[in-house]
Image (cartoon, grey):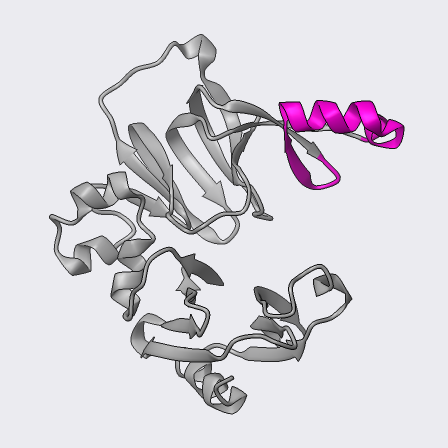
Amino acid sequence: MQHEEIIRRHFEAIGARVEFRPYGRRESWLAPDSVLFDVLSDRRGRYFDIAVGPEAPELVVLQVRPKEHHLLLYSRDGSRFLCGHDERDWFIAAVPKRVSTVRDAKQALMPPEVWEEARRLSPSATDNRRNPVFVRQGEWFFVPVDREFPEALVHRNEVLLRWGSRKPHVCEELYREGGQLIYIVGGRAYAKDEYMVKRKRNPKFARARVEYRVGDPVVYVRGSIRHPDHATVRLDGWHRVYVNGEPRTGSVAFLD
């Protein structure tokens, strides 16, 4: 691995702190060649936590943008991670494409449907959280649409949650189309068929508390969108919701 002290200096250049550590008990389920990233807190504040497996690939910083408080981190296994600060907190996002700059990483994280329109904007405009194509709050993109929906089917103060996230975005008004029912047991998501099989085979599982969510629907929102790590945005008129292009290991879920 590239010397940890060099990587620390790159993080310091964007105003961040990073701590490296070997796998602990909570990472024991991971393969030995994995690296686990997180943003944690201690007495000194928020910091990037990098847990390194015994056979983990080398990490290299590809680009640092101090004024933007962003850097692009590359793992020798081919993975790329955008690390930076967005409004009120630090974040890490796995980049789905082979890129070498922070700007290209940001563009790669845009949903394809959004980028198709946003590519006509200037580079500085696409970096803005509000422009003629979209309004962005964290990983969510809101694109204006010319549609209306039956008031009786509009949900109020509905939660918008990417599976695996800890903090939901709360939408003043939300309308949902399609999607599939997702069963949440012990913090893990199950499709209906998988849930029914486990319920039949395991009496203890059958007695466990279940939460229900809708996975991967088409969602439209209107009004205020609130989140503790972001400034509240106000959407006048209906907007279709898209999530960023970060590779995901679970379902994008919207809580009923």
Q: What x and y, as percent, mark residue 182?
A: 60, 28
Q: What x and y, as percent, mark residue 106?
A: 30, 59
Residue 176 forms part of the magenta stretch:
no
Determine the image quadrant of residue 15: bottom left
Residue plotted at (39% across, 79% down): 61
Q: Residue lying furthest right in this view?
A: 203
Seen in the image, is 233 located left or right of residue 212? left
- Residue 132 in view (yes/no): no
Count of numbered badges drawn on the protein: 0
Residue plotted at (18% across, 46% down): 118
Is residue 245 shown above or below 201? below
Where does the magenta region start and end?
185-208
Seen in the image, is 59 located left or right of residue 53? left
Q: What x and y, as percent, mark residue 160?
A: 50, 35
For this rendering, which residue is in front, 152 or 177? 177
Seen in the image, is 186 located left or right of residue 102? right
- Residue 115 in view (yes/no): yes
Residue 199 forms part of the magenta stretch:
yes
Residue plotted at (59% across, 70% down): 33
Determine the image quadrant of residue 204: top right
Is residue 45 shown above or below 210? below
Magenta part, dominant SS: helix
Q: What x and y, as percent, mark residue 93?
A: 44, 59
> Could you tell me which quadrant the C terminus lies in?
top right
Is residue 180 shown above or below 160? above
Determine the image quadrant of residue 149: top left
For this rendering, which residue is in front, 196 or 40? 196
Is residue 237 shown above or below 7? above
